[in-house]
């Protein structure tokens, strides 16, 4: 019997392959969809969705340069607009147009509904609970990384 560690790595690789091959985002670059989802979730919470670059870097674990390129792309496509902070050292983004993102998001939701249909609601709830627990533990977190 394989060691649990090996089985986790194998399962992780299989899951990553499934998610990449299903192209959970088809009409947006993956990183664009991740940033838009973050801004959209902030919007759902506060009605504004104003999100700092620093928060995007911290929550997505993307490099600052990649966040900048992704945001520049989303601004150019008309999804987001940049907003200067009060002290000019902090830049925020907010949604300019959720319509196209929500079309893409609906495709992702349809994929997830299919997954729930396959594994069942109870296992889906267990998956969410475990994924959130792993994310909260952040085993790869390096407190010295500056984020």
Image: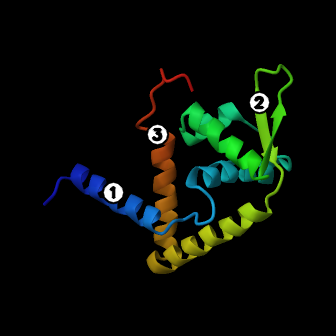
To which residue does mark 3 refer?
Answer: 137
Q: In this rendered view, identify the residue nearer to me: 29 or 130.
A: 29
In the rendering, which numbered label is found on residue 91?
2
Quarter of the C terminus within the rendering: top right
For image coordinates 67% across by 53% down, the residue present is: 37
For image coordinates 86% across by 50% down, the residue present is: 47
Q: Earlier in the sequence, mark 2 or mark 1?
A: 1
Furthest toward the bottom, the residue is 117
> In this rendering, does residue 105 appear at all?
yes
Q: Position of residue 53 (x, y in %)?
A: 69, 34
The picture quadrant where one finds residue 101 is bottom right
Q: Earlier in the sequence, mark 2 or mark 3?
A: 2
Q: How many residues crowd around disc 2 within 10 Å: few (fewer than 14), some, or many (20 or more)?
A: some
Label 1, secondary structure: give it: helix
In this view, the mark in front (2 or 1): 2
Query: Does the residue at mark 2 contact the one at mark 1 (Cβ under 8 Å)?
Result: no
To which residue does mark 1 refer?
Answer: 13
């Amino acid at each position: 019997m394989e060691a649990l560690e090996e089985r986790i790595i194998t399962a992780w690789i299989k899951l990553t392959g499934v998610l990449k091959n299903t192209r959970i985002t088809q009409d947006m670059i993956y990183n664009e969809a991740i940033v838009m989802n973050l801004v959209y979730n902030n919007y759902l919470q506060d009605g504004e969705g104003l999100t700092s670059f620093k928060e995007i870097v911290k929550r997505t674990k993307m490099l600052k340069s990649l966040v900048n390129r992704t945001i520049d792309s989303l601004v150019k496509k008309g999804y987001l607009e940049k907003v200067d902070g009060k002290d000019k050292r902090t830049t925020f983004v907010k949604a300019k147009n959720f319509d196209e993102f929500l079309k893409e998001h609906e495709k992702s939701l349809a994929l997830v509904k299919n997954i729930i249909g396959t594994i069942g609601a109870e296992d889906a709830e267990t998956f969410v609970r475990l994924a959130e627990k792993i994310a909260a533990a952040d085993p790869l977190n390096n407190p010295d990384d500056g984020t």
